[in-house]
Image: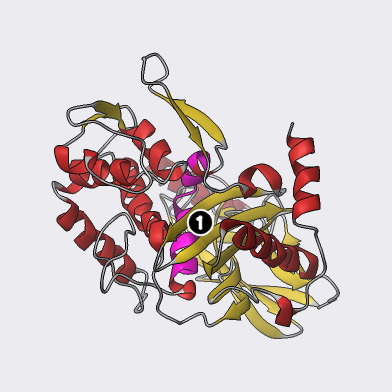
Amino acid sequence: MKKILFLLCLFLFPMSVFAENELLSNAESGILIDADSGKILFEKEKDMQVSVASMTKMVAQIVILEEIEAGNIKWNDIVTVSRNASSMGGSQIYLEEGEKMSVEDLMKGISVASGNDATVAMAEYISGSEEKFVKRMNEEVKKLGLKNTNFKNCTGLDEKDHFSTSYDMAMIARELVINHPEVLRFSSIYEDYLRKDTDRKFWLVNTNKLVNIYEGVDGLKTGHTDDAGYCMAVTAKRNGLRLIGIIMKEDNSKVRNSEAMALLDYGFQNYKVKTILKKSKSIGKIKVLKGIKNSVKLRLFEDLTVLDGVDKDKNYTYSIDSKGSVSAPIKVGDIVGKIIVYADGKRIKSINLTVAEEIAKAGIADLYKQGLRSILNGQ
């Protein structure tokens, strides 16, 4: 079935090699970034303040996932729907006053169907009221250092002084996929059901059709209102490269989808991820003070990669910056230094280093044995 849909997509939205000046020609603004580094690969009026419709819900998702990660709420918690939440218009999952639904199913309703009622139900469950929840959403935006975003509601319905920009939306989307990747478990669903074992069984179909027709797309959020037009935050991953695209104010969903795919095509055709060092590679040792071992191997938290042009052949080098020694006890995950990467001699990034194994603090007997061993070795 997916093959048929993909071929149909090729017919409706033929893939082409786009020049930069042809990208997002119909959109009011937009941006394409590398999710890992945040580097801007393409931009059009990225700082223009515009209505963003249901893309607003990405910040609501950040708050929900933070609450889950902190243990303040659980996926199987049951939420009782208020009259206010059930009265929300626009996109909805048709919640009724007094209806009970799990946090997980409400998150599906937000991520897949863009349910305004589901979003308000979660806002009230977490903060007590939509107003307090929106205040927290605005605080989240400020924590990200974004200055061109202001929310008046949690759903994205048109309202005065409710706005953002392509750049800010890209940074919000990046925060989601990098620091709260569980969102992709929901945003990648193409279809599912709510209230499965009831007479009110509800079919969910993702408002982001690219999830089902573009290779690598697994999110993130669509939007549409009169003021915002048709907009989208889309993310896709291929061969280790994750892109995030923002498309603002298109005339209809067909044009929005077509221009979103062209934007992603441009990114995947012109950029690649190059692995400089594998996580498993040994990159030296660091001295351990007062530990049961005198030294420990250094390790990367993850593979060391860089963004590169497909037709580029830069010379990459690296250096290690550490204190020279650490004091026990020390465990895997503790930061003990940095590895700095250079492209053609120019510093481009740095990432943290940890240790390959846990080293416990030495007891008196351990220190005595180490001292004796050093004497016998003539040290």
Closest to the observer: 227 or 239? 227
- Which of these two is toward me, 276 or 151? 151
Find residue 275 and report its horizontal and vertical position in percent: 74, 61
Does the segment drawn in magenta span residue 236?
no
Secondary element type, mark 1: helix
Q: Which residue is drawn at the image coordinates 26% and 42% (left, top)?
A: 122
81 sits to left or right of 294: left
Foreground of the two, 3 or 349: 3
Mark 1 residue type: Ile
User: In the image, what residue occupies the spot 48% across and 51% down?
Assistant: 333
Indicate left or right for 153 with 110 as reference.
Answer: left
Near mark 1 (Cα within 10 A), the count class, few <14, some 14-19 or many ≥20, is few
Is residue 284 at all visible to an observer of this figure?
A: no
Q: Give the percent coordinates (x, y) of residue 180.
A: 44, 50
On whether residue 171 falls in the magenta region, the answer is yes
Q: Position of residue 370 (x, y in %)?
A: 51, 49
Q: Judge from the rendering whether residue 207 lies leftward or rightward of residue 138; answer left or right.
A: right
Q: On the rendered image, what quadrant is the N terminus found in?
A: top right
Q: Quadrant of residue 348?
A: bottom right
Q: Main secondary structure of the magenta part?
A: helix
Highlighted magenta segment, given as a residue range: 169-186
58 left or right, relative to 178: left
Residue positioned 73% across, 36% down in the render = 2
Residue 368 or residue 21, whichever sits in front: 21
Q: Position of residue 138 (x, y in %)?
A: 26, 66
Q: Which residue is mark 1?
A: 178
Vertical placement of 97 versus 323: above or below?
above
Is residue 281 visible to us here?
yes
